[in-house]
Image (cartoon, helix red, strand yellow):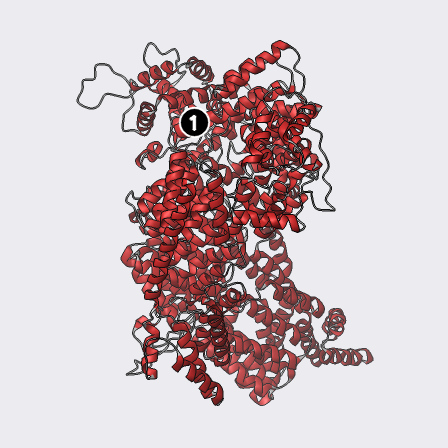
Amino acid sequence: MAGGGSLKEGGSPVFDITPHKIAVCHLVQVFALHTQPDMPFVFQSVSHHHRLGLFLFSLTRSCEGFLEPSLEELLNQLKALGGLAMLSEHLISNLLVLSSPDDLFNFFDKLRGVLAAPEGSSMEEEQALLDPNSHLGIFIRCCILTFNMLPFEGVCHLLTNLVAYCNSNDSTYEMAEDDDFNGSEFHELLEDPEVDCESAELEEYGLQNDTQAAENLTHIPSKFLSSFLEDNQASDSPRIKHGDDGSQSGGLVPLLNNNFRTDDNLGVLRSRWQIEGYLNMQADLLEKDAISFPLYSFSATLRQLQKLAPELHRVRYLQYLNALYHNDYLSALDELHCYFDYSAGMEGLFSRSPSPSSEFEVGRYETALLCLGTLQCHFGHPKKALEALTEAVRISQQNSDDSCLAYTLAAICKLLSEIGISNMTGIIGSPYSLGTTTGLGTPLSTQQQLLVLLKRSLERADHLKHTNLLAFNHLALAKFDLKHVKKPLLSFGPKASMKLRTCPTSVCRELRLSSHVLSEFGTDGLLQLNDTGSFSTSWLKNLSAVGNPWLKKLQKPRSLSVNDYDTFQFYAQPSPIPGSVLQLAGASYLLRATSWEHYGSAPLVRMNALVYATCFADAASSSELSLAYVKLIQHLSVFKGYTEAFNALKLAEEKFSVSSTHIRLLKLQLLHARSLHRGNIQEAQQVCDQFGVLASSVTGVDMELKTEASLRHARTLLAANQFSQAAAVASNLFCTCYKFNMQVENATVLLLLAEIHKKSGDAVLGLSYVLASLSFCKTFNLDLLEASATVTLAELWLSLGSSHAKKASSLIYQALPVILGHGGLELRARANIAVAKCLLADPSYLVSEDPDAVLDPLSQASEELQILEYHEMAAEAFYLMAIIFNSLGRQMDRGLIISSDTELFSTVSTHGNFHLACHTMSFQLVYTSV
Amino acid sequence: MSSKESYRVELRSAARQLSDRCLYSAAKWAAELLVDIEPDAHAPASSVSASASSSAASALATPSTSSAARPLSHLHPDASAYRRRLRSAAASGDIAATPPAGVSYISTPVPDDDGLNSDGGNDRYLLAKSYFDCHEYRRAAHVLRGQTGKKAGFLRCYALYLAGEKRKEEEMIELEGSLGKSDVVNSELISLERELSSLRRIGSIDSFGLYLYGLVLKDKGCESLAVTVFVESVNSFPWNWSAWLELQSLCTNTDTLNKLNLKNHWMKDFFLASAYQELKMHEEALKRHECLLGVFRSSDYIQSQIATALYSLRQLDEAEVIFEDLLRNDPYRVESMDIYSNLLYAKECFSALSFLAHRVFLTDKYRPESCCIIANYYSLKGQHEKSVLYFRRALKLNRKYLSAWTLMGHEYVEMKNTPAAIEAYRRAIEINPRDYRAWYGLGQTYEVMNMPFYALYYFRKSSYLQPNDSRLWIAMAQCYESAPLQMLEEAIKCYTRAANSIDSEGIALHRLAKLHSVLGHSEQAAFFYKKDLERMEAEGRQGPNMVEAMLYLARYYKSEKKFEEAEFYCTRLLDYTGPVFTSQASESHLVTSCPLPVKGVAKASEISLLAYVKLRAMGSAQEE
């Protein structure tokens, strides 16, 4: 348990007795023996006593840093508890008394009296002694044991450290830095090339003044004392003031400072258990929001830790993660290999129990390969990633490491689903290949292989009771079901009749199954890992925040997504569910949003995205969270127009840093759509080009981005009336999508092709495309897209002549429920205009009889289009309305229309659509002549 | 001549000054060099000592023993062939005794010892020095407290530094096993740094003080400042070899080396030569050392450096001659004998290696080099456990012993203890990240574990550090070629690189030919087979590869309808003096069962015979 965790691990030296522990022991003694007559210290109230107990508990469990707090900090925290001022003096005086080895012996001898006698012996007095099996009891026992095992040299070391520890208290808090002492340190820092970046980084934080930056730099080493994150946040004004004050009053305390320094160098580490907690916490934070971790200073922290505890190889893993999330390929690769060179065979990433098994193990190298694979995947080298992962499969089979195999399979699935690989042969074609073991003679397509793998991975995860993995696999299956039609694997023999459609219910089922993690994580053994002392950490942090009011002010929401707990609430604890479980559960909501996006239900998209953004923000990584925001903003742009969307985007940009790719993409998307609607072709083309640049140049990587870029390119060309070019781009895109099996995208591309032909006036050709698109939509249950395609179909029929008006209107009425329920502004407007056109084209309909049947949809469409700033289409609506008014003879209304129309006319005529412009012009001429 | 004479004067005074300040190893180095200067045939020994005594400031103590007695001793007739060769080259060629034209060394004045303020001070210094000599460092420092002279100040600081170092070593063992890493620091560093930096600021620091300051800075990790300080130190007193060595250890690449602002003293040549050696620029190192040999004709140090460079250039026989010579000259030498043992290991000279091991064992068994030699011997004998034991001992004595870590890794690989091997290699890399052998070892280990893709990273690293080594490229190619990967195109690229650098074993050409034939590039395959055949002919080798090449070529030309060539190869095949074969079927059968083992045995017996002869020769030399 807890404090003594390391003792179990073969007497690893990380749990050693340190001055800080002596101080804590002393406090525990006071806490336990306060009723005894010979204790000089008396608590003012019971609540004080309890608070001290809670404080001690947190102190031995918290993991906000890897170094033990100095006496200074300890005293400050004690002070923050309130009402225990006497206790600090008591503590100091008692620590100062310990001046010879014998004093220490006596101290620990007395400490033994704190522990209650084991059961069975008589309890003479009514004493509140510590239960030896309680957390604090175990801590005390560990300390006593470690002390008793110390050789004389160890006792001497302890004594020296103790003196240094007490002296550190005497030096002023504002760590005055002696000039030349710091000079060397500073030099050393300057030597490293990284420091330049560091100062640049600091400047980014708003430190324009060079000297200030330098001042700040000198503080970095001393900053290791406490949590890195916090200090970085607090590094603005107060810190610098401290430094200035110190240098003014410097010269007084250099010696003490030196003592402090040597002490620092000796490195008073927390217990191994606490350090591992710290590392896990940092890893989580890194994954969540890498941007808040400046690359170099964090790696400097880690290096310091590595120097102090070289046997903690986990630090290297953190280095790897740090490099990975900062996109430093080379050093990530180096650190990865380094970590596994040292730790493979010793430390497994997936070992359930926190303590590694003691027996000598040759293994875990497969984990190295798995990590290498994911690294290559992260950096967009799919081929290398696949090589690494296949090797991982081979080695885990060789070492019969089932869990690693399951994870590797899942990783391969992820890779295959994310990265477009048109042809699998030659990649997994080796004798150890995955596909051939299915026993089917025919080569499988990538998708079929993926499905087989997914199923197998799912089975394996289920078999091994890896709940997380199971959830992940269900999610992956859902994703697969969403986008792919399941074809029979057998290419011969009797075929069961199969509907070649995707099945929304199966997607839904998988999604529901994946959410099971929430209910089942308790049985997974994850629970014990969960207890990493983060509760104690947050409690202590709150305590210090209360102690220093200025710090409280600085503690703005550090990480954008952390729920803000009230500062001084003992009950404010972080969620009891492990972050990974929450993440998976959240991911299922995000996927739900995406699937509804496909199936075409806007309200459900919005709802799921909202659920994600509000409930899972704690565990979500910044990129996933930004994705949810993106969905919400997209929804806004479609339903409320661009002004609102851009306002929301501004908020999102503030919340996430600018470098978030999702947000950047969203901005481009919005800009592009708006400039297309406004008819600003040049701007649209520029945005389009920016889009293309964002995608990686490697084939098969960033497929979605590439598809979208060329889709937008085609749209831009279409808006510029360059039909043949637009058609060429679109058909090219169709070929790529077909090659990489992206059928959902195919539906969109086909629809676009139909639109192009419609606009170019080739309605017959357009018909075939739109019908193809419709069949795709049906297959993949893309309802909204289907509705949109139906409208296009109707328009195409209409353009073939008034004889088809009936057919067209029936088509539109068929699609209207979906469109009115879920469609965005543009689609609705289009449908409305089409309805009006159908009526107008219908010979049996007379305008004079029922003008509202035409005017209502038209006016609604024009309103909606104006919100969207879609000038071209709005002009069309107005034009139609004006004609109707003209025929009705309502001059006044017509005049109104014309006046608003002239505005639009100017934009329309500047940007292209001459056809419409001419119409409007002639119409105006007619009007003015009348 | 005058320059030699001035060298002698400088070195003599320097050795005295260094030993006065208890910088023993530097003093040793200077004294060795002093003895090794080629005597001027014309200058009588007496005048040498006379001039020395006149120029040196306080030449009170026994000056003549070293310079007068030895010059005759190394004129004795058993000087080696190599040495003679060099000497004749020096006499005839441009490696003259005087420095080459165009290089003008600036003469650095030999600094005077500062006068001690009083007799009492001098006495105290004497006492302190004797304490120091008895390894009672703190006492020595204590005696010298309050002394103001530079010399006394230096000794006090140096004593404190050593006391701190001693304590550091002790603490390291107290806190952890000596093989463990630890971050114990010398507790005196901070106060020393403070004192020395303030002294440097006011300018009252001499070169020795600067040397010490540099040491402190280096230990603290302020490396760039340490470099400047060391440069200052060697510029004002160039004869302190320890300072040069420290400087060298900080020059981890050629850029820093070239940026150093060094005065052009002849000691700089020693430094550069040694630094080049360390940076694996063996050719340059060799050139410089041979140049220096012109003046310091019989220097063992230079000889050993030359031998090391030759060994690194894989000219084993030449290196061996020099090493043998060295050992004959100075039978109790331990320095750089580990490299000799590596050489003997590479040549598989069992008895010579055992002889060497025995000798160093008797001389000083607690030297890391000795342990390494013994470990090498056991390794050669195939007793890997014992070998590891001795490597561990060597590492206990010197935790930064780079080659021992790597070699221990090799032993662990032999013992199939891969995690230990990996750790050993990693430790070597930690000491020197540019050690390509360790990277290569890591790659091999992973290859053994059947993880060729993973191993590629390491091979890539090592070939990056040593781009012209064909072995590394071949290793990489073999990874690509291995069954799980089957990336033949990449393998071909690597083999091509290997074939372009010197590939002594000729693996690359053969594999290239084979791979091309597998991939159906018959033209390239024929090209490489032909090349391989030419190479084998040039080296006078025979073997199954030859048969294979000729067979392929014959078939190739036949398919190309070039019957003349085909016939040529067919007849050559018939002429081939191998075991009798009649039909093509048996030929191809023969390819698989090669007669190589027999040949290997023959070679081994040859080698052992050779070693025996050598041993006898050595023994007889000793008897003489």
Relative to A660, is B259 above or below?
above
Residue A928 visible somewhere in the drawing: yes
Q: Amino acid at mark 1?
A: Glu
Relative to A772, is A301 above or below?
above
Q: Nearer the viewer, residue B197 or A843?
A: B197
Residue A574 visible somewhere in the drawing: no
A388 to the left or right of A520:
right
- The residue carrying mark 1 is B171
Tell me where residue A275 appears, x and y as whole percent.
42, 37
Tell me where residue B595 appears, x and y as whole percent.
33, 70
B176 to the left or right of A115:
right
Q: Nearer the viewer, residue B70 or A315?
A: B70
Relative to A464, is B191 above or below?
above
Q: Secondary structure at mark 1?
A: helix
Residue B486 sits in which quadrant? bottom left
At 27% from the left and 26% from the top, the residue drawn is A132
Q: Nearer the viewer, residue A852 or A421?
A: A421
Residue B124 sits in which quadrant? top right
Image label count: 1
Q: Nearer the viewer, residue A774 or A799?
A: A774
Which quarter of the image is occupied by the N terminus of chain A?
Answer: top left
Relative to B550, is A712 above or below?
above
Q: Residue furthest left?
A: A120
Which quarter of the image is occupied by the C terminus of chain A?
Answer: bottom right
Q: Chain of mark 1?
A: B
Residue A95 sits in which quadrant? top left
Tell me where residue B70 appears, x and y as whole percent.
56, 33
Tell me where residue A748 appears, x and y as whole percent.
53, 74
* Label 1 crowd bin: few (<14), some (14–19), many (20+), radius 10 Å: some
